[in-house]
Image (spheres, rainbow, N blue to C red):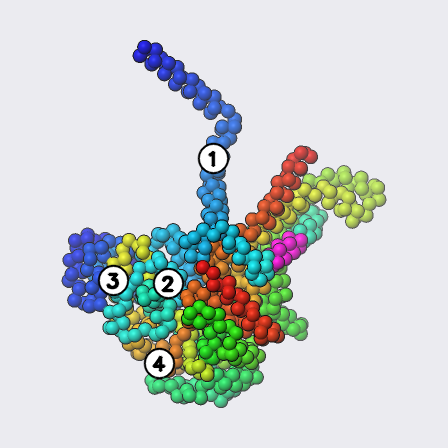
């Protein structure tokens, strides 16, 4: 009896070894194991902090009591918060539109440069994008300095009145958007340039034979061929721009009169500087639905593009 | 960085031997004061100041046989603030940490009360000013020892020549080196007239109205001078009071004589304003003068640090104290307290003041007459009145006497400068007051 039992046990072990062997040989298992380090990283560095932020956003100011959606409810009643929502949308949407337009135009210019000199131009035009934003924003800070602006010094040379780059609401908003566009436009340029290079030359030749003007070639050939890359780049940039922190923080700190505060900087002001971490978390979480919508569009577009290919 | 290892037995023997020297520190005689001690200190901007604190700490560590690790953490980019927030959340970190103004109160429940060392220190070194007590003592418990390193008064630093030339004010005669001030005529009205005269002369006063601390501190002093409180000590919102209206009206008149870009100023702007030679007066500790000494000696020769103008409610100067604190999760609280006591001795405080070129201010009454302040030059005696040696002004912080959790938010969100700018730009007084009241209502939640 004992012998039979032992044999049974051996057989069972053999079966399990064999099924483990099979499992390990499956492509999906190997793929899973290979992506496991990344999954762990995402869990530790993304999922856990995100979950913790949600947890923090549901605590009271002293972090001693669970208040559910109390912090969000509180924010809905704050005038300053709605100003931040408006400014975040204004900042992100305006900056992305300008980055897309400038990127598109510059990509066309670069595309039309003979290939021999194109690399130099591509390299130079990418410089604003590859410099760490905190560094380049500091340089812009000196250009916009309230009392010693280099730009105003140049304007004074032309007898033009000084501009309060960071001192007046309108100009301060313009300044932070300008710096964001300066930093981000090269990304659009390089993506659009890659897309332009993939448009078959025959399509332009056919359009020319049909008598299409330059703008018709852009409208009926270039834009439809670049549609997916334009959408993906714009939506990707929208996410990054909404979550921006460094440009506003360095350039204006949200001043004057909080008129340049965006979600990231306001969350920092409320959460870290003012010591209300739950409310700061709640402010930062307001980016989530906006960014989730953008991410959904990106994924849908990628899927659509994939199925078209 | 200072480091040395020692056995616990040797430490106990050493502390017993040193017990007579440290009269005010009987608490360190326990065996737990041995071992390691990690420090997170404010990274001083004055070259060489860190070296002096390091040498002092080494001296203490050698005597007490404690292995010390020092991290000098800059306040640039809020690094110190972020470190404190991270340690508070993680419940792990330095055994002793520097915290500025409102932070001890914010972390009151996580800090070890230090009444056992503060009371003997006050007995030995004299009382601390009201702002130190307001910020450092919560519910009868001292949450930290006021640190010499980093503590500062942000009073006026005037240009002797420009004030004489345009405003007809001799600041050296008003605040003579080595003698009590003769500043009865130095009122907010005189200040306003001087601001106007200097602005017309092309050298406006440089007082920021952004939301960073220099702007908030100046606004706080002027509000205090009118007795204007946004929230009283009980926590009632008192924005809609006559005193607040008077303070706003005064500021509106003053702002007309300030550089037009002051709403965009940060803490560096006023320094640059003075050092460039454009300003006749700024509200700052002597850091701007020290930079001028290096970069613009002609400007430095004309700088004189002195007391602020008096208003209807008295004469107030902005004061920003730092504290040395220890977390309740620190592993070596006894050693941390021992070091705090050592650094608060007169000899230590004086060395720190000298190393900082007179910038650092001990909070204890008996430590405001060190020779450094009388000797610093040029011109000789320029810093004599910086530590308020004759106590002719009340050292204050903006938003006091509000309960700490409300006051901190009024301060960090720059409510006062924002009120001033709103009102100056044409918003109706009542609308500005309504806005401020609503903002402050939001700070009341628990």
| Along the line of sight, the residue nearer the viewer: B402 or B51 | B402
Q: What is the secondary structure assignment of the residue under circle 4?
A: loop
Q: Earlier in the sequence, mark 2 or mark 4?
A: 2
Q: Which residue is under mark 4?
A: B391
Instruction: Residue A245: tell me if it is visible.
Output: no
Of the two numbered discs 2 and 4 in the rendering, the one whose residue sits closer to the viewer: 2
Q: Which residue is under mark 2?
A: B104
Q: Are marks 4 and 1 in contact (CB under 8 Å)?
A: no
Q: Which residue is under mark 1?
A: A36
Q: Residue A10, how many percent across, how many down?
A: 37, 15
Q: What is the secondary structure assignment of the residue under circle 2?
A: helix
Q: CA distance from mark 3 to mark 1?
A: 49 Å
- Image quadrant assignment for residue B390: bottom left
Q: Chain of mark 1?
A: A
Task: Decide: few, some or many residues near mark 2? Use Cα within 10 Å; few <14, some 14-19, many ≥20.
Answer: many
| Along the line of sight, the residue nearer the viewer: A293 or B68 | A293
Q: Residues at marks 2 and 3, common chain?
A: yes
Q: CA distance from mark 4 to mark 3?
A: 30 Å
| Along the line of sight, the residue nearer the viewer: A202 or A258 | A258
Q: CA distance from mark 1 to mark 2?
A: 43 Å
Range shown magenta: A86-99
Task: Decide: few, some or many residues near mark 3? Use Cα within 10 Å; few <14, some 14-19, many ≥20.
Answer: many
């Amino acid at each position: 009896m004992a012998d039979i039992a032992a044999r049974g046990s051996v057989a069972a072990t053999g079966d399990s070894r064999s099924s483990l062997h099979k499992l390990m040989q499956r492509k999906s298992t190997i793929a899973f194991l290979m992506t496991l380090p990344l999954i762990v990283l995402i869990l530790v560095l993304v999922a856990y902090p995100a979950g913790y932020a949600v947890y923090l956003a549901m605590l009271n100011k002293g972090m001693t009591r669970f208040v559910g959606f109390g912090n969000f409810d509180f924010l809905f009643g704050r005038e300053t918060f709605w100003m931040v929502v408006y400014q975040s949308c204004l900042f992100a949407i305006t900056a992305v539109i300008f980055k897309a337009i400038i990127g598109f135009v510059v990509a066309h210019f670069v595309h039309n440069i003979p290939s021999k000199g194109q690399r130099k131009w591509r390299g130079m035009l990418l410089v604003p994008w590859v410099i760490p934003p905190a560094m380049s924003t500091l340089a812009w800070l000196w250009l916009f300095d309230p009392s010693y602006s280099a730009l105003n010094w140049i304007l004074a040379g032309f007898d033009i009145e000084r501009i309060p780059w960071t001192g007046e609401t309108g100009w301060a908003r313009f300044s932070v958007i300008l710096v964001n566009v300066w930093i981000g436009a090269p990304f659009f340029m390089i993506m659009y340039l890659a897309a332009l290079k993939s448009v078959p030359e025959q399509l332009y030749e056919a359009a020319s034979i049909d008598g299409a003007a330059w703008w018709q070639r852009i409208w009926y050939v270039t834009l439809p061929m670049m549609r997916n890359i334009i959408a993906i780049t714009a939506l990707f940039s929208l996410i990054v721009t909404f979550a921006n922190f460094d440009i506003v923080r360095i350039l204006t700190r949200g001043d004057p009169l909080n008129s340049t505060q965006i979600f990231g900087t306001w969350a920092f002001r409320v959460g870290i500087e003012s010591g209300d971490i739950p409310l700061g978390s709640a402010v930062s979480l307001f980016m989530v639905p906006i960014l989730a919508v953008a991410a959904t569009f990106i994924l849908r577009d990628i899927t659509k593009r994939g199925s078209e290919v | 960085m200072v480091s040395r290892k020692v056995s616990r037995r040797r430490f106990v023997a050493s502390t017993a031997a040193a017990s007579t020297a440290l009269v005010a520190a009987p608490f360190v005689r326990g065996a737990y004061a041995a071992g390691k001690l990690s420090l997170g200190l404010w990274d001083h901007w004055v070259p060489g100041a860190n070296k002096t604190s390091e040498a002092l700490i080494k001296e203490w560590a050698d005597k007490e046989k404690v292995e010390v690790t020092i991290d000098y953490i800059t306040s640039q980019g809020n690094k110190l603030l972020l470190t404190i927030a991270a340690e508070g959340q993680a419940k792990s970190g330095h055994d002793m940490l520097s915290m500025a103004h409102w932070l001890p109160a914010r972390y009151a429940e996580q800090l070890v009360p230090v009444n056992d060392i503060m009371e003997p220190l006050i007995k030995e070194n004299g009382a601390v000013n009201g702002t130190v007590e307001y910020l450092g003592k919560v519910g009868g418990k001292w949450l930290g020892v006021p640190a010499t390193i980093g503590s500062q008064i942000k009073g006026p630093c005037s240009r002797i020549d420009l004030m004489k030339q345009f405003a007809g004010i001799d600041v050296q005669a008003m605040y003579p080196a080595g003698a009590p001030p003769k500043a009865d005529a130095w009122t907010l009205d005189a200040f306003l007239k001087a601001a106007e005269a200097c602005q017309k002369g092309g050298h406006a006063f440089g007082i920021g109205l952004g939301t960073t601390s220099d702007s908030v501190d100046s606004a706080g002093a002027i509000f205090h001078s009118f007795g204007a409180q946004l929230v009283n000590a009980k926590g009632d919102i008192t924005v809609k009071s006559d005193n607040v209206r008077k303070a706003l009206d005064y500021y509106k008149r003053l702002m007309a004589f300030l550089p037009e870009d002051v709403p965009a100023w940060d803490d560096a702007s006023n320094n640059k304003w003075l050092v460039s030679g454009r300003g006749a007066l700024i509200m700052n500790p002597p850091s701007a003068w020290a930079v001028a000494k290096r970069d613009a000696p002609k400007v430095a020769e004309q700088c004189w640090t002195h007391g602020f103008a008096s208003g209807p409610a008295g004469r107030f100067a902005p004061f920003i104290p730092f504290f040395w604190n220890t977390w309740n999760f620190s592993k070596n609280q006894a050693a941390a307290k021992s070091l705090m006591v050592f650094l608060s001795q007169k000899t230590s405080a004086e060395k720190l003041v000298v190393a900082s070129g007179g910038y650092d201010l001990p909070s204890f009454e008996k430590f405001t007459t060190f020779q450094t302040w009388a000797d610093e030059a040029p011109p000789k005696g320029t810093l004599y009145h910086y530590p308020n040696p004759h106590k002719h002004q009340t050292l204050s912080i903006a938003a006091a006497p509000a309960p700490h959790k409300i006051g901190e938010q009024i301060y960090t969100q720059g409510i006062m400068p924002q009120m001033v700018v709103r009102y100056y730009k044409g918003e109706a007084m009542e609308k500005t007051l309504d806005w401020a009241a609503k903002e402050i209502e939001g700070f009341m939640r628990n």
